[in-house]
Image (cartoon, rainbow, N blue to C red):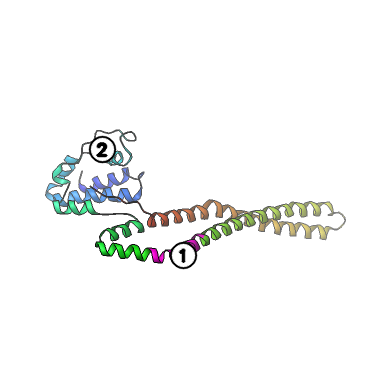
Amino acid sequence: MNRIEFMRQLERLLQNIPEAERAEALQYYNDYFDDAGVESEKEVIDALGNPAKVAENIKRDLYGDEAVQSSVKHPPMKYQDISNTQQQKEKKKVEGGLFAHIGAWYEGLPDWGQVLAIVGLVLLSPAILGIASGLIGTLISIVVAWFSLILGFGVASLVLLAILFALVIAGIACIAEAPFGALALAGAGLLCGGIGLLLLMLTVAMIGIVTPAIFRGIVSLCRKIFGKKEVTA
């Protein structure tokens, strides 16, 4: 097994973990190979073990020993860090959303800069609260309007389908006395039914496809803004 095969198998075995953690793990082991060099590729693979054990080790680190029971050994120490300097940088690295970056920026300010930042925040707090309230109100209005639209389409589709059955039944009832009128009623009913089916399919698509996509986008945006702060050792 070479490096490419090892990394491909590892990537396939990590498909059931979050994308960010998977990318970080793959980059971590790619760095091992890069640091060791091509001449030590086989030695690195022998030290790491098979990709399945490495994947279990990663999952155990993410979810704990109770979720993934494994006796996989960790890579040798000589492959774990490039240098002491880079290790210190990793300890100080902050990954997160907007608030995490603001916090890191604030901590990097001198004492007088932190005081000025607090004073500025206090002075601007009314404007910040007003903008935040406006954004929250707008978001709530959009959500209410969206679900009202779904409800409207759903009710309209049911009404049109009910009209379909009513007009078809009325057409059948008067077909002997007024055949052309009966055909007209049936045609109008079929037209209403077709529109009703289209609205019904649109309603189902809005509920089952568009709405989950919108909420996933909102959750993703919130994670970027309120992202967790991770400090790597």
The residue that mark 2 highlights is 53
The residue that mark 1 highlights is 131
Residue 128 locus on image (x, y percent): 43, 64
- Please tell me whether residue 231 belongs to the stretch shown in magenta: no
> What segment carries the magenta color?
122-136
The kind of secondary structure element at disc 2 is helix
Q: What mark, if any, has residue 92 been given in the picture?
A: none
Q: Quadrant of residue 187?
A: bottom right
Judge by depth and name the residue closer to the eye, 142 or 31.
Answer: 142
Image quarter (top left, top right, bottom left or bottom right) of the N terminus = top left
Tell me the residue at 49%/56% (across/down).
214
Q: CA distance from mark 2 to mark 1?
A: 51 Å
Confirm or deny contact between disc 2 and disc 1 (CB under 8 A).
no
Residue 182 locus on image (x, y percent): 81, 57
Tell me the residue at 23%/39% (across/down).
50
178 vs 101, left or right, is: right
**Residue 83 in sight from this viewpoint:** no
Q: Residues within 10 Å of mark 1 (few under 14, many from 20)?
A: few
The kind of secondary structure element at disc 1 is helix
User: Magenta residues: mostly which secondary structure?
Assistant: helix
Q: Amino acid at mark 1?
A: Ile
Residue 82 locus on image (x, y percent): 15, 51
Q: How many marks?
A: 2
Residue found at the far right of this picture:
177
Q: Nearer the viewer, mark 2 or mark 1?
A: 1
Tell me the residue at 14%/51% (across/down).
84
Tell me the residue at 28%/54% (across/down).
94
Q: Quadrant of residue 46?
A: top left
